[in-house]
Amino acid sequence: MKDLIVIGAGTAGLTAALYAARAGKSVLIFEKEGIGGQIATTPIVENYPGIQSISGIEFADGLYEQVLALGVELEVDEVLKIEPQKDHHKVISSTKEYVSKAVIIATGSKPRLLGLSREQELTGRGVSYCALCDGLFFKKKSVVVVGGGNTAITEAIYLSTYAEKVTVIHRRDVFTADLNLMKQAQEKSNIFWKHNTVIKELIGAPSLSALTLENTKTQESENFSVDGLFVAIGQIPQTEYFKDLVPIDSEGFFEIGEDCQTLIPGLFVAGDCRKKAMRQLTTAVADGANASKAVY
Ligand SMILES: Cc1cc2nc3c(=O)[nH]c(=O)nc-3n(C[C@H](O)[C@H](O)[C@H](O)COP(=O)(O)OP(=O)(O)OC[C@H]3O[C@@H](n4cnc5c(N)ncnc54)[C@H](O)[C@@H]3O)c2cc1C
């Protein structure tokens, strides 16, 4: 019997473990893939308060070592099910069953990829999934945003303050973003639009330098020079296994407030898997701390 089981060793889960362990609680974390979650996949982080510049791996390692030093245990295993009981919860992984007085689901999300060959190789080398994280690296450069929803248009507006030229590429002729956002974007003189267009190929080594584009109506293709590509075609929340216990919104994110508490006593959610306006390290650590306080 643990005091707390945390599902997911990303920034939110590790922060929750940190606070709980410092409050004297016994904590076990489950991680199915890699310690550190999403941030471990990025070469550089420059927007975490108090740290001027750090690699994602270094950030994740530092947080992991901090919780290990406090006696937090880790199981590398995927949690498949939580069975709420009267005064504790059963946590069922792919190999074992555990019991805990409280459980925090901090399973995060993943950016939806375009699915192009070389996409992973060029991530952090011109291909990005977060304008807020990487926009500043493209000051006075030419960037493309791919997507047609609110996220894509918000990213385009944000990038237009740094980049010389922002081109929004969308596979349809109509954007699904709110009209108000569209109006703001259309008023920017350095945002350009390409409708009915898809990206067929990423070109450049060691960094992205161009895209092969195809018009979906005419099938004409063109080579388009760019310094950066921002992929904003959505997120895939890792909530599938737990959606019967915690309500989710239309995109699959847990519909739980900032206090991180679910309607089931002893069950909490934290981090990017939660419905929220901004998915960043700062908001993940805030959730981890809030969830842990609620557990306590
Ligand atoms: C490429 C990239 C660059 C970024 N750069 C920045 C940046 O510069 N600055 C910034 O502030 N933010 C950045 N972000 C966003 C930031 O990484 C996220 O907001 C943050 O990592 C969210 O933390 P989290 O713990 O909620 O989720 P995650 O980091 O997604 O961690 C969740 C963890 O849970 C694990 N998991 C999921 N399901 C299960 C299960 N069933 N059983 C066991 N384990 C499970 C996953 O494997 C994962 O490790 C970036 C994101 C990406 C993708």
Image (cartoon, helix red, strand yellow):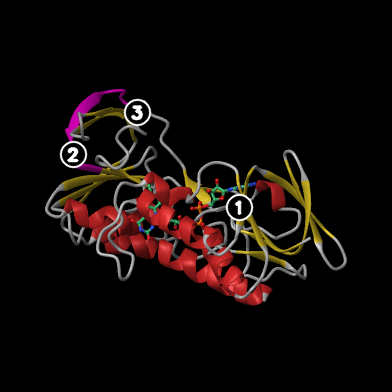
Hey, what amino acid is under mark 3? Lys
Marks 1 and 3, the one that precedes in the sequence: 3
Above or below residue 56? Residue 86 is: below
Residue drawn at the location 85% of the way across and 68% of the way down: 87
For mark 1, give the secondary structure: loop
N-terminal-most mark, 3 or 2: 3
Residue nearest the viewer, comparing 90 with 234: 90
For the residue pair 19 and 154, the one nearer the viewer reads as: 19
Q: Mark 2 or mark 1, which is nearer the start of the sequence?
A: 2
Q: Dividing the picture into quarters, in which one does residue 132 lie?
A: bottom left
Q: Quadrant of the N terminus?
A: bottom right
Kindly report the distance in space between the C-alpha atoms of the residues bearing marks 1 and 3: 32 Å
In the visual, does 198 lie left or right of 22?
A: left
Three-letter residue code for mark 1: Gly
Q: Which mark is residue 226?
A: 2
The region drawn magenta spans 217-228
Give the label, 1 or 3, closer to the camera.
1
Residue 150: name its quadrant. bottom left
| Residue holding disc 3 | 217
Q: How many marks?
A: 3
Mark 2 element type? loop
Determine crowd level at label 1: few under 14, some 14-19, many 20+ residues with C-alpha closer than 10 A: some
Q: Residue at x 56, y 56 (%)?
A: 273
